[in-house]
Amino acid sequence: MVDLSFKIKDLYFKNPVLTASGTFGYGPEFDDFVDVSELGGVIVKGTTLEHREGNPYPRMAETPSGMLNAVGLQNKGIDYFIKHIYSEIKSYKTNMIVNVSGSAVKDYVEVAEKLNHLDAIPAIELNISCPNVKEGGMAFGTSCESAQSVISAVRKVYKKVMIVKLSPNVTDIASIAKTAEDEGADAVSLINTLLGMAIDAEKRRPILSTVTGGLSGPAVKPVALRMVWQVSKAVKIPIIGLGGIMNATDAIEFFLAGASAIQIGTANFIDPEISIKVIKGIEEYMLRHNFKTIDEMVGKLEC
Ligand SMILES: Cc1cc2nc3c(=O)[nH]c(=O)nc-3n(C[C@H](O)[C@H](O)[C@H](O)COP(=O)(O)O)c2cc1C
């Protein structure tokens, strides 16, 4: 038998497969397809202090081996989440983690403070990496100084597990990861989407209303793997890897590169049952390769 569990600080995850923010709703949207409680965790949609309409349409474009999105953190805000969504998701028997987004440090802090009081939310994922919000988001994750300001401010008020989600739109991701660790992050997750664009040549216009958007899916996997591998050399805290994971083999590659857990994003749109299939595939691989724990696999890339 294999043990799929892992921990971030004292927080126990029954397996290392989580669903990525913005690609799995809040969980109930997928009840018809999977038993959400079987997942290692669910990272819910980016939640901000105030209600956000998101960006105008069109805000999705297909690309070879991936997709571009410019949803722009559409959500009803933290108070709505607490009042209406929390009660719907708090009975899932898995780690329900809220992705916290914002455009000012004080917004992140206020949202984190409110989440501190929710017993069924054991962790937050601090999104300092959203490329689709004009007035902030990604800006926090692209320099050590700005990352430091938001991470340390949230750390002061948030007492439970804090995961910091990193932007790939930087030249030196390892130094941002190190900053996150130094400022008290309990884990880092990477990558968020890569900034890209799509053009309609006939109309001579950009396809997305925002011109640029975030690229995700198989196209980004090599970049994500490279970054996870670089970050694993720079920090001691656990790494949650994501970016283009479409099956169990992709997931295993992230473990070998140094991740202790993974998230599934765009693949949920193609196959809503993929997360559970990936859990089974990881187990099969571990049996075939005689790995008894996830830990035994992490960083076992032979270069
Ligand atoms: C439609 C869509 C919405 C997303 N919304 C969020 C979000 O609210 N917060 C966040 O941190 N990441 C968000 N992401 C990024 C994903 O969580 C993930 O980091 C990225 O898509 C890379 O993983 P993938 O290639 O497996 O999709 C979103 C991605 C997509 C495609």
Image: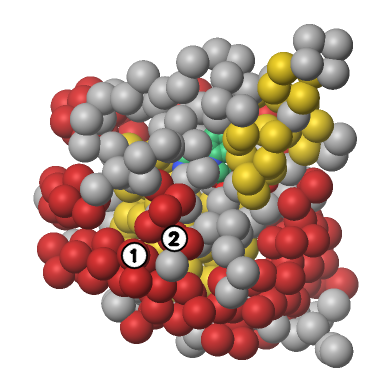
Label 1 crowd (10 A; few <14 / some 14-19 / many >=20): some
Image marks 2 and 1: residues in contact by CB distance under 8 Å = yes
Report ligand 1 position as a quadrant.
top right
Residue 94 lies, in percent from the top left, at 42, 50
Amino acid type at circle 1 is Ser
Q: What residue is shown at x 13% (from left), y 63% (from top)? A: 157
Residue at 80% across, 71% down: 287
On screen, 229 above or below 83?
Answer: below
Please name whichever residue, 198 or 291, is drawn nearer the observer in this view of the structure. Answer: 198
Judged from this view, the residue extending furthest toward the top is 203
Label 2 to label 1: alpha-carbon separation: 7 Å
- Quadrant housing residue 28: top left
Q: Which of the numbered marks, if any, corresponds to residue 175?
A: none
Q: Is residue 262 left or right of residue 26?
A: right
Which quadrant would the N terminus be assigned to in this image?
A: bottom right
Disc 2 C-beta below 8 A from ligand 1: no
Quadrant holding the C terminus: bottom right
> Can residue 173 be seen by looking at this rendering?
yes
Instruction: Measuring from the top left, give residue 63's x and y in whole percent.
Output: 80, 32
> Residue reaching furthest front?
204
Q: Nearer the viewer, residue 28 or 173?
A: 173
Residue bearing the label numbered 2: 141
Type of amino acid at the residue the image marks with label 2: Gly
Residue 146: which disc?
1
